[in-house]
Image (tube, rainbow, N blue to C red):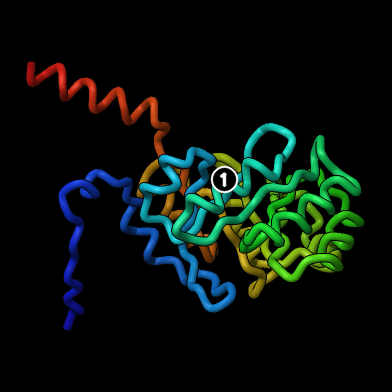
Amino acid sequence: MPKHMPTYTGTLRSHTLALPQCVSECGGIRIFGRRIKSLAFSTDVAIVKNINADAIIAVYPFTPQPVISQAIINVSDVPVFVGVGGGITTGARAVRLAIQAEHQGAYGVVLNAPTDNAIIRQIKEEVDIPVIITVVSERTDIRARIDAGADFLNVSGAARTPEIVAHIRNQFPEVPIIATGGPTEESVLKTIRAGANAITYTPPSTGELFARIMDKYRDTL
């Protein structure tokens, strides 16, 4: 018999962002007692506060700044995984950023694909939160990443993400994989069935959401 789940949304919060329902088919990853199936890819604090994802992945195309991660952690009602560099920002600076992210309350640190394995080792020696390495290609030496201390893989291969996930899962049946799900339920399900434990979802921007609302307002006037 299907389980009945009573639901309450209220009036003011009925417009919050909801992830595709199919994300619930993930097995999830349990971190510090929390089961995480979905992560919202956003640094917009308004989005962070108004989305039903299990966690936030705060990675952005600038040098990581602790003031940004602290703002997101303070606003978020769910765990936050913080980007600490690994591409342009690397070496001792990335290590220090990882240490500070842990002190701020981050649930994990995310490193970019170019990160050297030596940096992964150094960070893993310093922090007690998960170290997550981004993977963008099947050519990545996953064994070397794991041996260096990476706890999870963050697969971000655009349209090829399901194929990359399947390739990794075939070789490493137990490695925890977070992966981008794409824009549709079909693409999300394809990534889950390829072997992803958790899905990263990119929500619409506040600009896009405002455009939709303004269109409705115009239609009523």
Toward which corner of the image does residue 126 lie, by quadrant? bottom right
Q: Would residue 107 appear left or right of 123 to someone viewing this image?
A: left
The amino acid type of the residue labelled 1 equals Ala
- Residue 78 in the figure: left or right of residue 126: left
Query: Compared to 163, does 34 lie above or below?
Result: below
Q: Is residue 139 above or below residue 29?
A: above
Please say if 70 is above or below 198.
Answer: above
Residue most extreme to the left: 221
Can residue 191 be spotted in the picture?
Answer: no
Q: Is residue 43 visible?
A: yes
Q: Nearer the viewer, residue 33 or 30?
A: 33
Characterize the local packing of mark 1: few (<14), some (14-19) or many (20 or more) Cα atoms within 10 angstroms: some
Q: Position of residue 188 (x, y in %)?
A: 43, 52
- Residue 22: image location, x then y, percent: 34, 59
Judging by the rendered image, the residue that carries numbered circle 1 is 71
Question: Observer-nearest residue: 42 or 200?
Answer: 42
Badge 1 marks a residue whose secondary structure is: helix
Q: Nearer the viewer, residue 46 or 61?
A: 46
**Measured from the top left, where is residue 8 in percent x and y?**
18, 62
Residue depicted at x 42% and y 56%:
53
- Residue 163 drawn at (x, y percent): 59, 51
* Quadrant of the snapshot with the C terminus: top left
- Residue found at the far bottom of this picture: 1
Q: Residue at x 39, y 66 (%)?
A: 25
Q: How many marks?
A: 1
Residue occupying the point 67% across, 64% down? 152
Q: From the viewer's perspective, is residue 189 above or below residue 211?
A: below
Examine the image and state in which quarter residue 211 appears: top left
Quadrant (top left, top right, bottom left, bottom right) of the N terminus: bottom left
